[in-house]
Structures are given as structure tokens and as C-alpha cells.
Image: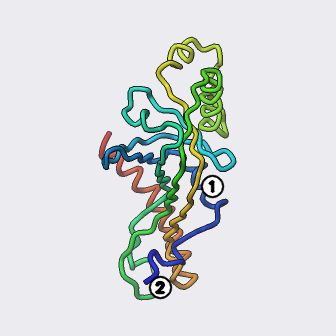
Amino acid sequence: MNYPPQHHQDNDNNHMVEVIKTYPLATVISVHNNQPLITHLPLMYDDGKLIGHIDINNPQAQLLKEGNDVTLIFSGPECYISPSIYSTTQLPTWNYIKVHLKGKVDTNPDKMALKQSLITMTEFLEAPEHRYILNPKNPRLDKNLDYIVMFEIAITHWEGKFKLSQDKKPTDIAAAREELVRSNQESIKQFLNNIF
């Protein structure tokens, strides 16, 4: 048995990089003594590497050191797909875009590199409007450098999971795509209204 089905796998690294750049908040998973440590961190992609920062007091910071293995999950849009949107008879399903990566970690202790990396990360996250610029002379930035660890992950394994009703006929694929867009916009609005 071939699982997951090949039509739900996307091995195009360019597609996966686009997910990483558009949805940069990664689930970072390390294992210590058979126990997973999990942190959610925004990461920047740079030519086969991911660059990130973690609070020195986070227990996972100790595992984000040279040569250690790490697993990452990036999550794109997802939603329930009702058979009611299809023109053919189908069963309910869930569509999603995920990128699973594995890599080796290296820590960079250089404070000037850390400072520049934080500025670059801010520029990346502020794009395209750049409403805020992190000034290198910001005293709060300098004060916090001792509490942040910068790390790089060399990606060793890529796996794209793009479950988007690819096994359906073209009109149903298009309907599922429209539902993914509609559902994500609507569900975020409803969720925020219920919480706040």
C-alpha cells in the first residue's frame, strides 16, 4: 500500500519554500530522553537553511545546538470539505497544506550576527509594507541579546503534503479550492468573534 497517496504529496521544493515563506510559524520538535519538546517559532528560509531565534530560558534552546536533529512542521491553509460543494457524489474530507522537514541544527553565538538576524527577521515579517523598522541602535534590542539564541537548521529531508482534492474531477478540484479560501476567511472571523 502506498501511503500517503502520491497525488497528495508535493515534492517540488519551490512549492514547499512558498509555504514556509507565506506561513513562517513552524512547529519545532526536538526529542530528549524519548520526550518531545515542542516550540512554535517563526523561521526564515535562506538557501536550504532555516534561521530562527529562541528564548534562552526555553528548555528546547538547549537542544537547538550543533549537530542535533530537529523536525519541523509548517502549516498552510486547511478546512473541512463538505460533499455538498462537489458536482459528484463524494464523502466528507479535510483538505490541508503541510510541509514536514528534518534537519541538523547549528547555533551561532555571535552577538552581532544575532542582532543583524533579528533585524532581518523583522524586515521579512514586516513585508511588504514595512510599517516598522527595527533600529540597530534600539536600546531594548541590545539589552535582550543575552537572552536570545540564534540557530540555523540545515534541511536534510523535505516532504510536502498538499491534500487538495486532486483525485477529483477538475470542477470539483476548483470547488474545493474555493471552499478552502472561503472557509479560512470565515472561520478566522467567527473564531475571533467567539473568543474576543
Residue located 34% across and 47% down the image: 36
Could you tell me which quadrant the N terminus lies in?
bottom left
Of all residues shown, which one is farthest toward the top?
Answer: 139
Which SS class for mark 1? helix
Residue 121, by quadrant, is top right
For disc 1, the marked residue is: 18
Q: What residue is at 47 percent from the left and 40 percent from the top?
A: 41
Label of residue 87 in the image: 2
Which mark is first along the chain, 2 or 1?
1
Q: Position of residue 156 (x, y in %)?
A: 58, 55
Towards the viewer: 40 or 183: 40
Where residue 72 sits in the image (x, y, percent)?
A: 48, 51
**Between marks 1 and 2, how big is the CA–CA gap?**
30 Å
Direction from residue 40 to residue 122 in the image, left or right:
right
Label 2 near label 1: C-beta < 8 Å? no
Numbered circles on residues, count: 2
- Which amino acid, by three-letter code, is at mark 2? Ser
In terms of secondary structure, where does tag 2 sit? loop
Q: Amino acid at mark 1?
A: Glu
Relative to 54, is 91 above or below? below
